[in-house]
Image (spheres, rainbow, N blue to C red):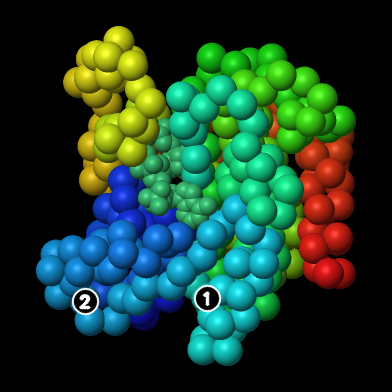
Amino acid sequence: MDQKLCLITGANAGIGKSAAIQIAQQRHHVIMACRDREKGEAALRDLREQSESSSAELVIVDISLQSSIKDLSEALLEKYDRLDVLIHNAAIFDITQKQASRTDEDIESVWATNHLGPVLLTELMWRALNNSAQGRVITIASKGLIAKPFLRVDLDDPEYRRKPFSMENSYYQSKLAQIIFTHWLSKLGSKTRITANCIRVPAVRINIDKYPGLSAMQKKAYALKSKLSLSPDQMANAYTFLATAAEMEGVTGLYYNENMKPVKPPRYTEQSQNIDKVMELTMGYLRRWLKA
Ligand SMILES: NC(=O)c1ccc[n+]([C@@H]2O[C@H](COP(=O)([O-])OP(=O)(O)OC[C@H]3O[C@@H](n4cnc5c(N)ncnc54)[C@H](OP(=O)(O)O)[C@@H]3O)[C@@H](O)[C@H]2O)c1
């Protein structure tokens, strides 16, 4: 079996960490991209203990910042001329946040982290993905979108500059944009060997201690919901399958559930006029950043 080179963002916790460990257990080389060195080092130690993989490594990136993504991709491209798998797992969804927060580069944080960051990282790693025998880009969306059938990407105000902020809508908007990006990318990759697929994640247990602002009621509700939720390890099976399975070679443009089965994506994300508009909006940011 060929050893794949897999880059996974947000690999220090939750599903990303479980997927990093599973992929390393298959003896692939995992690059764990984390924003916090201490948490990243702890996760790398766990990975090494659980996978006997000596070839995993930690890199530091804040995926909400174009400057940090550029630094990471430069460092990676200096070291590696190919990348086989890129998993855009890192995301934020803090339901206790009531006001929009902006990054140091003045972009609304959810839009920057969950959508723009993955697009820019893909763009900058495209050459390396293209050098792979079969580059795979994997994006992550949410099953919760089923409850938001009328939500759209707000083409005029995606960053909540003029309207009141809603964490829920901002998060689901970013996930709609990621599905759209996947469709667009899969078309773009059709003349290459690069594939792009998206995974729809249902409720999966997370460590809620990272949200100290949760009320007692919210904690109780979360504990109840957790009983029906998947573990990060269970969910990571789908990431690992899409990243490594021989059956996935050449498969592109699909939306997968936790059981590794293709499911229908939201209709809005498949319509070509919506794909064009959302990607025109997205590429506007990239054009400015790549010029800077
Ligand atoms: N859990 C669910 O029920 C659920 C449902 C639907 C979709 N999803 C999706 O599944 C994916 C994984 O979620 P999870 O449940 O495993 O979440 P999680 O436990 O909160 O992990 C998120 C990871 O992303 C990292 N991250 C956040 N912002 C970052 C940034 N600016 N730069 C770099 N890394 C950053 C976090 O790092 P820190 O530890 O430093 O914060 C953490 O490693 C996400 O895309 C999420 O939207 C999850």
277 vs 35, nearest the viewer: 35
Q: Secondary structure at mark 1?
A: loop
Mark 1 highlights which residue? 83
Q: Residue at x 63, y 16 (%)?
A: 149
Mark 2 surroundings: few (<14), some (14-19) or many (≥20) residues within 10 A: many
The tally of labels here is 2
Residue at coordinates 54% horizontally, 14% vertically from top-left?
147
Q: CA distance from mark 2 to mark 1?
A: 18 Å
Quadrant where the C terminus lies? bottom right
- Could you say whether the residue bearing mark 2 is in a helix, strand or loop? loop
Q: Is residue 44 above or below residue 163?
A: below
- Name the kind of residue labelled 2 in the image: Ser
Q: Position of residue 284 (x, y in %)?
A: 86, 52
What is the three-letter code of the residue carrying label 1? Answer: Leu
Find disc 2 in the rendering and name its residue.
53
- Say which label, 2 or 1, has the lower sequence index: 2
